[in-house]
Amino acid sequence: MALAPVVQRHREVASTMELAHQLAADGAAHGSAVIADRQIAGRGQRGRAWASDLGGLWMSVVLRPVRVDAFEALSLRIGLALATTLERALPGLAAVGLKWPNDLLLRGRKVGGILTEARWVGAQCQWVVVGLGLNVTNILPPELTTIATTLADEAAGAEVSALVAPVLAAVQQAGRSAGPLTASELDAFHARDVLSGQPVREPVVGTAAGIAADGALLIRGPDGATVPCRGGVVPGHP
């Protein structure tokens, strides 16, 4: 009989990611999660600190996808699922934009982020932990108020307690496969893509031109050629 997912709730932790990795190492099933009211050492993409105080949804989920080719597409697939979930849960919410590779935006300001970390033995993926941070009713640090927002500021009735179940279910379902994005997923991402047409300066100078099925950012260079890239910086977007 398959093990049921384990869900841990904590008042305060250093990082839900670390606890979720430990759960996975101990054999926790797909969909197991660690949720905290507050993190004191939350982290985002490229090791950046993530402000995660009371009032936000801070969650890390253990995934054991049936395939892991095109692994970079996983955060995009989860972003699509979360965007749809938030819009359904919060009537009146503006369309959620997606910024490659891991950000959710509302009206151009960041409302959430996704971090994926895999553990491998040789070429075999043992598990993936997906960390999710959503600003809900938490007070943002002053230095972030011009580039970030909260769900409560954008839609009436936003509460962490009401979002935990649908958000967790969305991640569990979207994380069952880390294969390439389907044609319908690519179309759905294109409709939410906030980078399309924006300048990119690293690692290739050019213009963002969508994403590939394997999750790579497509950049159109000055010569008109389009190349897939795994890292990029867009001016004006954190």
Image (tube, grey):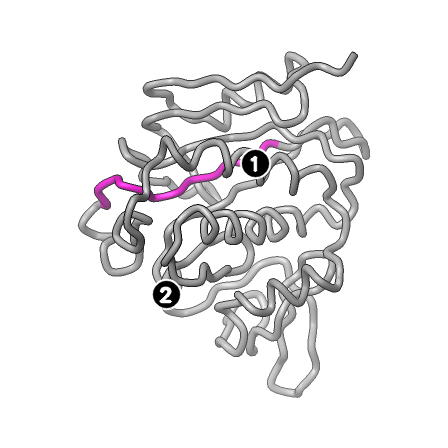
Q: Amino acid at mark 2?
A: Gly
Give the SS element for disc 1. Answer: strand
Give the SS element for disc 2. Answer: loop
Image side of residue 202 versus residue 181, left or right: left
Residue 100: say if magenta: no
With respect to residue 116, does 39 lie above or below?
A: above
Span of residues in magenta: 129-140
Position in image of residue 179 (x %, y %): 77, 48
Q: Furthest residue to the front?
A: 91
Residue 133: say if magenta: yes
Q: Which mark is residue 108?
A: 2
With respect to residue 58, does 231 lie above or below?
A: below
- Mark 1 — residue? 130
- Which residue is at a point 65% across and 70% down the rendered structure image? 218
Position in image of residue 124 (x %, y %): 80, 31
Viewer-closest of 86 and 98:
86
Q: Tell me the CA gap for discs 1 and 2.
A: 24 Å
With respect to residue 119, does 199 lie above or below?
A: below
Position in image of residue 95 (x %, y %): 44, 62
- Which residue is at a point 65% across and 47% down the rendered structure image? 74
